[in-house]
Image (cartoon, grey):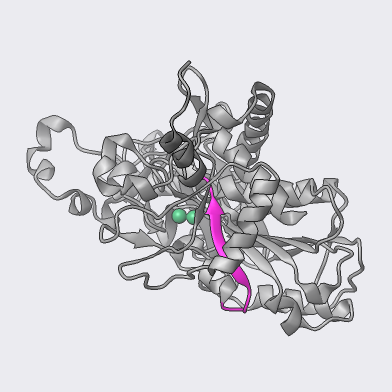
């Protein structure tokens, strides 16, 4: 082998070169990453909605000795707690030995994902079919949802307050539901419509049946299909039509996460955004090798619709919880928050060679190149974003490099193409240093999104490094 030139040596010393996890991870570590991905897949399958994610997460937390905490309860050093915010958001925390005024470490992910919610009066029949009307939740591309097997998840609160859980379409033998589309033979006109306009919100009606209610061997008068469907729902869940008005029912893609490709390095699933960061955030807190820091794992709702409301991150609950923890330990909430750090654990768009034109490759998140730090999100001239400070992200960088975390830094797409936000700015508004960190995703917000198992594992390692 010929010797390296001076210029080559100098370039090695001075230039940054993005590395791939295939170069940096040992075979042993890749095996661990695959095993971790299997655990994640199971969590994800049982966490399609924020409510389900709260329930599955609490089951894990209880198993690890975490106790339910309500505002005002006592808090002790070494304690492990979780605050269940209305079954839709979760704050799990471990109290460390470090002086609370030195701040807490927060990993904040969201557990809601884009989907189709049912309208308050969803059930109708039309020309031989029974339908449910939907209202899409979050940023979906509507054309992706017809002809897709759908499952119905959610809850119905009946008159008097009893809440029943609904889950149809996941168990073997369950029926699924579907939105229809035109056949290509008759879609010539529809095909000329711009993609964003071809499917309106009001066309996303879900077929849920077609058999009418029969009386004395004859089809009953009136809305016989609707009656038959309502009868089936009544028999299974004890609900009547008016109960839809006090329900939260969601149509989500049916089925389990699946490996993609012969090498099985990629995983496809509904709802990676953002359980693919929520699960590492949760498990990093659980597997934190030290008891020094107070660590809070936030699993938030409503990120996909702007983080508003009592279960979203614009709610003051995070700040109040930190204040309660600080007060209980004899500290000062304002000082504690000012010294706290948060990883806004959320996904970024992975560079997709099939759509290279929307990315600026030098500043894109490359799949299999590790966890991605996103200094700022927003759009245009960095509007509506938390732009993390150099000193703060410098600290994070040192942590990662000390612990051998493969990380990269990226923006989401070319500057004027679009944009998006996360919970980062809402956390930062509480005077907490925050930066976005997470997994690159292909086909983000599609009914079936794709991630790399190695990136998932690097994200877990990143959160572990941050927690300790
Ligand atoms: Mn997200
Ligand atoms: Mn999203």
Residue 209: image quadrant is top left
Where residue 20 sits in the image (x, y, percent)? 50, 33
Residue 238 part of the magenta segment? no
Where residue 236 sits in the image (x, y, percent)? 60, 44
Q: In this view, does 340 lie above or below 448?
A: below
Q: In this view, does 257 lie above or below 468?
A: above
Residue 435 part of the magenta segment? yes
Tell whether 296 sits left or right of 301: right
Residue 90: image quadrant is bottom right
User: 266 and 52: which one is in front?
Assistant: 266
Q: How many marks?
A: 0
Tell whether 134 sits left or right of 64: left
Where residue 98 sits in the image (x, y, percent)? 86, 67
Q: In this view, does 57 lie above or below 85?
A: above
Task: Please say whether residue 152 is visible from this viewpoint.
Answer: no
Task: Please say whether residue 337 is visible from this viewpoint.
Answer: yes
Please state the quadrant of the image where ligand 2 appears: bottom left
User: 115 and 238: which one is in front?
Assistant: 115
**On the rendered image, what quadrant is the C terminus found in?**
bottom right
User: 115 and 406: which one is in front?
Assistant: 406
User: 455 and 38: which one is in front?
Assistant: 455
Residue 34: image quadrant is top right
Tell whether 329 sits left or right of 70: right
Where residue 343 sits in the image (x, y, percent)? 61, 60
Residue visible at 18% across and 32% down? 183
Residue visible at 47% across and 17% down? 262
> In the rendered structure, which segment of residues is drawn in magenta?
429-439
């Amino acid at each position: 082998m010929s010797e390296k030139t001076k210029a080559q040596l100098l370039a090695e010393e001075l230039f940054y070169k993005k590395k791939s996890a295939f170069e940096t991870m040992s075979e042993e570590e890749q095996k661990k990453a695959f095993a971790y991905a299997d655990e994640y897949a199971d969590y994800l399958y049982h966490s399609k909605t924020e409510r389900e994610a709260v329930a599955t997460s609490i089951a894990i937390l209880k198993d690890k000795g975490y106790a339910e905490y309500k505002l005002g309860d006592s808090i002790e050093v070494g304690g492990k707690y979780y605050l269940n915010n209305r079954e839709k958001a979760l704050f799990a925390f471990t109290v460390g030995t470090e002086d609370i005024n030195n701040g807490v470490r927060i990993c904040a992910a969201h557990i809601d994902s884009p989907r189709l919610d049912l309208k308050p009066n969803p059930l109708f029949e039309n020309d031989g079919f029974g339908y449910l009307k939907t209202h899409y939740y979050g940023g979906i591309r509507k054309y992706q949802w017809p002809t897709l097997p759908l499952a119905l998840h959610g809850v119905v609160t009946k008159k008097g307050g009893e809440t029943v859980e609904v889950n149809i379409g996941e168990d073997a033998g369950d029926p699924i539901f579907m939105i229809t589309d035109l056949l290509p033979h008759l879609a010539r006109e529809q095909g000329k419509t711009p993609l964003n306009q071809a499917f309106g919100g009001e066309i996303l009606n879900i077929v849920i049946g077609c058999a009418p209610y029969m009386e004395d061997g004859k089809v009953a008068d009136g809305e016989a299909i609707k009656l038959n469907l309502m009868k089936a729902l009544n028999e299974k869940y004890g609900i009547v039509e008016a109960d839809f008005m006090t329900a939260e029912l969601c149509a989500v893609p049916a089925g389990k996460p699946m490996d993609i490709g012969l090498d099985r390095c990629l995983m496809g699933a509904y709802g990676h955004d953002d359980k693919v960061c929520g699960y590492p955030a949760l498990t990093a807190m659980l597997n934190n090798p030290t008891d020094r820091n107070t660590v809070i794992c936030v699993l938030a709702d409503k990120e996909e619709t702007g983080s508003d409301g009592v279960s979203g991150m614009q709610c003051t609950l995070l700040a109040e919880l930190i204040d309660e923890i600080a007060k209980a330990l004899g500290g000062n909430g304002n000082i504690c928050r000012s010294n706290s750090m948060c990883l806004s654990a959320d996904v970024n768009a992975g560079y997709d060679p099939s759509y290279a034109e929307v990315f600026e490759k030098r500043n894109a998140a490359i799949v299999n190149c590790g966890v991605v730090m996103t200094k700022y999100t927003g759009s245009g001239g960095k509007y509506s974003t938390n732009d993390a400070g150099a000193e703060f992200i410098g600290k994070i960088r040192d942590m990662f490099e000390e612990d051998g975390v493969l990380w990269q830094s990226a923006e989401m797409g070319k500057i004027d193409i679009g944009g998006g936000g996360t919970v980062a700015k809402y956390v930062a508004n509480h005077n907490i240093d925050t930066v976005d960190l997470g997994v690159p995703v292909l086909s983000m917000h599609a009914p079936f999104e794709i991630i790399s198992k190695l990136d998932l594992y690097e994200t877990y390692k990143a959160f572990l490094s941050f927690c300790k």
